Image: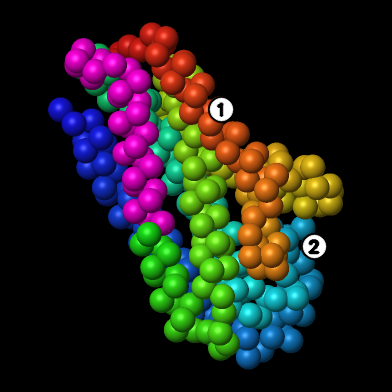
Amino acid sequence: MNIFLHELKAYRKSTIIWSISLVLIIALFMSLYSSIAKDAEGFLKILENYPEAIRNAIGFNQGNFFTILGFYSFPLSFITLCAGIQAMNLGTSIVSKEVREKTADFLLTKPVTRSQILTAKLMGAFVSLVITNIIYFAAASVLAFQVKTDDFSMKIFFLLTLTVFFIQLIFLALGIIISVIVPKIKSVLTISLATVFAFYFLGIFSDTTGEEVKRYISPFKYFDTAYIIKHAGYETSFLIAGAVIILLAIMASFVVYSKKDIHAV
């Protein structure tokens, strides 16, 4: 029995659905770019009526909003929200689905260690996210070239897009630790939605205070699109913070899972 391939097959349908969903979202927004760029003044007046925290949350930056890279930052906030839910859903279901579907006893009687089981499951979820991001990046790149009005840096476009994957890794790790700690999860989607939206709104709250340190409470604020566009890179401190969260959550998951009493009923 190849656990990795089994997991990859199990995630196949959700991977396709999420990939198509992200592509449709970015296609919808990018199709609006030409008309918005033509009526920049009118659209700017509309956005200025919103509070600054809301404008920051949706990636609005007046200085570069009407360039293709600046505009791309706008739908990127919604893309990362949806992508975060996908990753959280995968992470939370990694262990909990065996308990929920009453297959844990069967799996654990196989001649593999718990570390090997969790590693295979984790790799299956990781590859699923990689596939989603490859499809999304390919579609977003094609759309950007189709609607662009000026040349833009493909490097910066890639860096902006890569933030989706980084945020997914954080939520995947958080989902895994929840999956191994909580004895029995009845609804993975409920926990995923609650967790991701909680962090999303915490990110909005951090914008209202203006305090830089509060950005650390929400993964959605680890990647400032305006900073990426200006410096063609990421903020080191937030990259480190994200990496620490991922490593600690995954390491803790292996420790807890190796000692946990798992029952299929």
List x then y, in percent, for residue 186: 41, 27
How far apart, in angstroms, are the residues tagged by discs 2 and 1? 34 Å
Residue 110: where, in percent of width, then height? Answer: 19, 16
Q: How is the image coloured?
A: rainbow
Residue type highlighted by circle 2? Glu
Q: Main secondary structure of the magenta part?
A: helix
Q: Residue at x 39, y 48 (%)?
A: 129
Q: Is residue 232 magenta?
A: no
Instruction: Assign a secondary structure to mark 2.
Output: helix
Residue placed furthest toward the left: 1
Question: Nearest the camera: 120 or 193?
Answer: 120
Quadrant of the image containing the C terminus? top left
Residue with the mark numbered 2 = 52
Residue stretch in magenta: 107-133
Q: Nearer the viewer, residue 232 or 176?
A: 232
The answer to whether residue 242 is above or below residue 210 is above
| Magenta stretch holds residue 112 | yes
Give the left or right position of residue 110, taking residue 236 as reference: left
Determine which residue is flagged by label 1: 248
Structural crowding at the residue carrying mark 2, measured as other residues with C-alpha within 10 Å and reported as few (<14), some (14–19) or many (≥20) = some
Residue 48 placement, left or right of 202: right
Q: Tell me what residue is drawn at x 30 percent, y 23 percent.
A: 116
Left or right of 12? Residue 86 is: right
Q: Quadrant of residue 155?
A: bottom right
Visible in this render: residue 263?
A: yes
> Does the image show residue 178?
no
- In front: mark 2 or mark 1? 1
| 149 w.r.t. 78: above or below | below
**Number of other residues with Cα within 10 Å of mark 1, as a class: few under 14, some 14 to 19, many 20 or more:** few
Q: Amino acid at mark 1?
A: Leu
